[in-house]
Amino acid sequence: MTVVGDLAQTGSLAGAQSWEQVFDPYVAGRWRLKELSVNYRTPRQVMDVAAAVLAGAGPAEAPATKVVPPRSAREGHEEPTAHPVAQAGDLPARVAAVVAADLDRLGDGRLAVITPRDLRAPVTRALAATLPPGSVADRRAALDAPVTVLAVAEAKGLEVDTVVLVEPAAILAGSSRGAHDLYVALTRPTQRLRVVHHAPLPAGMTGMAAVAPADEPAGSTGSTGSGDGEVSRARAR
């Protein structure tokens, strides 16, 4: 029998702290651990951010700090970008602008907006008001839509072309396993990672290149596409 798992994605306090905890009560001395060291899904640039988040986890996140993240087998075409807002109330509109800017480039791909639960409703409303009709779905059951709004628990196990991550500091503070939850969110994209935030970025994410609102490419609401926009020299908080 082969059991596959990732302790870094354990979000529940009742979850496993170690593989010894899982197997020793039942098959002590009769199991072997083989760690997978290569990640074929996540681009190197995105995996670097996710690994840095685990490295920056505090003592309360002990299972995460014991995990050695895999190395990525491929380089991505784009660096992850941070999109800060001055006021917390501006988050939904900025999320909609960032998603709209990527929508034309998405083609037949999929984009997930991963957000804290308390921001889910306003973010979904802003997206529905900005994007073409039928573009946005709420919850995992509607993944056939180009854009889906998800909480971290719903995103676990999925992969999408682009992730727009909303307010990572709130995800980190949202549970005692916040670093695990943030790691899950950060490792969902196969191509691009965008981070929209008001609060300062958590440890491991502060080096991301920041895109000012004025540099955001003109968003797609069913019109012509655009490029990535100019990444400013300023660094995200």
Image (cartoon, rainbow, N blue to C red):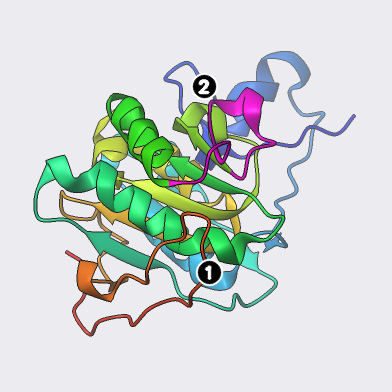
Q: Quick one: label 2, few (<14), some, or many (20+) residues within 10 Å?
A: some
Q: Is residue 227 left or right of residue 116?
A: right
Is 230 magenta? The answer is no
Residue holding disc 2: 15
Query: For the stretch drawn in magenta, what is the main secondary structure?
Result: loop
Q: Is residue 202 visible?
A: yes
Element at badge 2?
loop
* Residue positioned 23% across, 55% down in the render: 201
Q: Is residue 233 left or right of residue 30?
A: left
Closer to the camera, 79 or 221?
221
Q: Picture coordinates of residue 189 (x, y %)?
A: 58, 55
Q: Is residue 69 above or below residue 171?
A: below
Boundaries of the magenta span: 131-146
Query: Of the residues under marks 1 and 2, which one precedes in the sequence?
Result: 2
Task: Specify the quadrant of the image occupied by residue 151.
Answer: top left
Residue holding disc 1: 224
Identify the amino acid type marked 2. Answer: Gly
Closer to the camera, 198 or 20?
198
Q: Quadrant of the N terminus?
A: top right
* Residue positioned 68% across, 61% down in the render: 107
Q: Picture coordinates of residue 25 (x, y %)?
A: 67, 15
Identify the amino acid type marked 1. Answer: Thr
Q: Is residue 187 left or right of residue 51?
A: right
* Residue positioned 44% across, 56% down in the render: 100
Element at badge 1?
loop
